[in-house]
Image: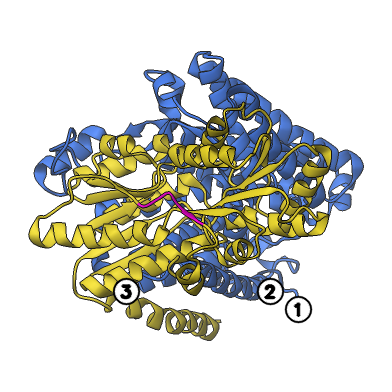
Chain colours: A yellow, B blue
């Protein structure tokens, strides 16, 4: 039995060793940790990973990406605690649930760690927790801008496909969109779940039950990709007004193929890249931009898609 | 008397060394030593073994432990509960609904939540016992039912899926403090003043230690583990638990109230899930519809790492607690060691597999099966 135990331990150690060494010895500069709220399954965050990796490489800092595997915000709070305990030079984090994350973030700040809020959250909340700044796209404002634009393009009744119903900040996009159109949100916001087949069928069912809907808003590739498939199946592709948040390969194809009118790019690359650069310069030279950075919204239409297409899913 | 026992041909002599070593918890112990050795080697100076770091993985382990105790006892009676994770989300939401939306005193909200959740546990058990359906299916149904309500109720009442303000509502509440408080503040302040542990450098908490007490969550975990262990190994009810899971029919024939034991264990599992949920909402101050996602599997994994048999009748609460410790230490330790976080599942899989193989081997030695 002792032999077996030894073998198991050896096996674990051998498997673990190269992985552990690889990361700790990579760089000698400052250490910055980015904590997100996204579950492993959310591929959109790959752009963020690439963004911090590139920034870390360019400024010579050691960067790490961490997230709760299932997207549980309570787990995320523990990860921020953990990040603070490992005493990095800075923490870049999302503020997906202010109540839950406020405590851990403020503790990190009080411990002397610089914090930048990225992606989710608001500039006010960032100030309240004592973060240096906020880098991201104010969700309600982006939704409002989208709604106003959609109204000009003739949308009167819409469906908002929300694949992240548990995150109130994402829902703000639907609320802003409705306000931009100047109509009540009502039951236009659909809790679609994250399973592609499920989303597709829910959208199909909703559209056949509500034939007067002439606009669709999806909140990211997770809900947009299946919605494209749904519209292609029921023949409404290209006919119904279709706007979406965020970009991805399928969305870019959709814009090119006249299925999607526009995509709202919040430029996640900047949300990951800028904080690393800003923290590094703050740590090295004590310089800091005086304002929050709005990484979006930017409307991406059929014109000027080439760069987006080239780097979709990687840096865009 | 002693002589007679020694010569009893039905009793096999086992050396005390062997008896001390060959236990259901052995796998968990070996795993714990291995995991700590590994992280001591690779993450020693990363802050993982400083006070703040220790507190971090202790809390995460304690969370797993609380649900693992319930899942372990239930698994020994031969049943599963896949609704643990949804129950955590549901219980937290109930506290928020009663305590914040309806603005009842927090202790009433907490007690009612416990009553509802334990009743749901009993319902789970009753359906399993009455229909004879596998608990896997029955509790899978409740996984969806409870998660659905957890999203539907706050959306209907407040049109959002996260209800905050619990911390304010629980301010000064005696029962709230039992779940969300911290003990030993004076001691940690003293340690901070003495310079043993770091203190905050700036802000409103300047001068306070970075770890200002032991959360009651950890106390709950320890108490539940001790309670579970004593019930299982030192009481008649503990024997019933083993018997119900080992061979329900044989147990019934020898007078064990199998149905009652199983329903009680479903209720206890629900109780454990609710304890974790209430601790969480008290600490974080908000209840979210996504809380507790996939926690049922984490509980089951901890229990299996700890040496329990999926088919019931065999296992140990201490083993489950060690399994939870391994789980927590690995999850947080990988972050400390700077390992790419997507590899966490790879490690988890390897550990699970290694533990199960080792545990099977140990069990064969204990029970003599081939």
Q: Which residue is mark 2?
A: B364
Number of other residues with Cα within 10 Å of mark 2, as a class: few under 14, some 14 to 19, many 20 or more: few
- Nearest the viewer among B176 and A193 is A193
Q: Which residue is mark 1?
A: B370
- Which SS class for mark 1? loop
Mark closest to the chain's N terminus, 3 or 1: 3
Residue A198: where, in percent of width, then height? 75, 52
- Which SS class for mark 2? helix
| Residue drawn at (49%, 71%) of the image | A306
Viewer-nearest of labels 3 and 1?
A: 3
Mark closest to the chain's N terminus, 2 or 3: 3
- Nearest the viewer among B215 and B12 is B215
Residue B168: where, in percent of width, then height? 39, 21
Q: Is residue B245 above or below residue B95?
A: below
Q: What is the chain letter for disc 1?
A: B
Q: Which residue is mark 3?
A: B42
């Amino acid at each position: 039995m002792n032999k077996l135990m030894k073998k198991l331990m050896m096996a674990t150690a051998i498997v673990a060793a190269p992985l552990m060494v690889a990361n700790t010895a990579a760089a000698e500069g400052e250490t910055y940790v980015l904590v997100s709220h996204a579950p492993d399954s959310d591929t959109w965050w790959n752009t963020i990973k690439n963004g911090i990796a590139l920034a870390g490489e360019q400024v010579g800092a050691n960067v790490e990406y961490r997230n709760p595997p299932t997207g549980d915000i309570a787990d995320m709070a523990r990860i921020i605690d953990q990040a603070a305990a490992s005493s990095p030079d800075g923490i870049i984090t999302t503020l997906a649930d202010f109540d839950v994350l406020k405590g851990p973030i403020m503790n990190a700040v009080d411990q002397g760690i610089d914090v930048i809020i990225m992606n989710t959250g608001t500039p006010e909340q960032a100030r309240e927790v004592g973060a240096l700044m906020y880098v991201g796209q104010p969700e309600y404002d982006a939704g409002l801008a989208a709604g106003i634009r959609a109204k000009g393009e003739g949308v009167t009744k819409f469906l908002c496909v929300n694949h992240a119903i548990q995150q109130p900040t994402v829902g703000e996009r639907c609320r802003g969109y409705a306000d931009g159109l100047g109509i009540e949100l009502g039951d236009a916001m659909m809790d679609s779940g994250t399973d592609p087949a499920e989303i597709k069928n829910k959208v199909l069912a909703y559209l056949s039950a509500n034939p007067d809907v002439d606009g669709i808003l999806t909140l990211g590739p997770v809900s947009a990709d299946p919605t494209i498939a749904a519209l292609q199946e029921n023949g409404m592709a290209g006919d119904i007004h279709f706007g979406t948040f965020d970009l991805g390969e399928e969305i870019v194809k959709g814009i090119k193929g006249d299925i999607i009118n526009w995509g709202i790019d919040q430029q996640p690359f900047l949300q990951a890249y800028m904080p690393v650069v800003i923290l590094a310069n703050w740590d090295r030279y004590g310089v800091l931009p005086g304002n929050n950075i709005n990484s979006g919204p930017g409307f991406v239409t059929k014109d000027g898609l080439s760069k987006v297409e080239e780097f979709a899913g990687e840096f865009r | 008397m002693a002589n007679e026992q020694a010569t009893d041909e039905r009793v096999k002599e086992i050396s005390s060394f062997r008896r001390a070593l060959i236990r259901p918890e052995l796998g968990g112990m070996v795993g714990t030593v291995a995991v700590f050795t590994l992280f001591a080697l690779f993450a020693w100076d990363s802050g993982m073994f400083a006070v703040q770091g220790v507190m971090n993985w202790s809390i995460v382990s304690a969370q797993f432990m609380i649900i693992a105790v319930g899942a372990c006892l239930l698994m020994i009676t031969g049943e599963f509960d896949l609704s643990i994770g949804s129950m955590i989300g549901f219980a937290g939401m109930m506290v928020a609904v009663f305590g914040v939306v309806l603005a009842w005193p927090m202790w009433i909200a907490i007690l009612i939540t416990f009553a509802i959740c334990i009743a749901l546990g009993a319902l789970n058990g009753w359906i399993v016992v009455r229909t004879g359906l596998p608990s896997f299916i029955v509790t899978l149904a409740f996984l969806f039912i409870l998660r659905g309500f957890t999203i539907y109720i706050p959306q209907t009442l407040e049109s959002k899926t996260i209800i905050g303000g619990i911390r304010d509502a629980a301010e000064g509440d005696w029962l709230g403090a039992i779940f969300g408080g911290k003990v030993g503040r004076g001691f940690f302040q003293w340690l901070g003043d003495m310079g043993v542990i770091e203190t905050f450098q700036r802000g409103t908490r300047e001068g306070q230690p970075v770890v200002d007490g032991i959360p009651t969550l950890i106390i709950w975990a320890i108490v539940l583990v001790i309670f579970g262990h004593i019930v299982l190994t030192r009481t008649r009810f503990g024997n019933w638990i083993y018997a119900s899971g080992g061979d329900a029919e044989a147990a019934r024939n020898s007078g064990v109230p199998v149905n009652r034991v199983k329903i009680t264990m479903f209720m206890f599992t629900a109780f454990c899930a609710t304890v974790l949920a209430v601790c969480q909402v008290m600490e974080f101050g908000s209840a979210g519809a996504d809380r507790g996602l996939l926690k049922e599997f984490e509980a089951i994994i901890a229990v299996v790492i700890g040496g329990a048999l999926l088919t019931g009748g065999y296992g140990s609460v201490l083993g489950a607690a060690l399994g939870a410790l391994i789980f927590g230490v690995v999850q947080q330790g990988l972050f400390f060691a700077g390992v790419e976080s997507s590899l966490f599942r790879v490690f988890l899989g390897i550990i699970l597999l290694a533990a199960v193989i080792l545990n099977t081997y140990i069990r064969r030695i204990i029970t003599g099966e081939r």
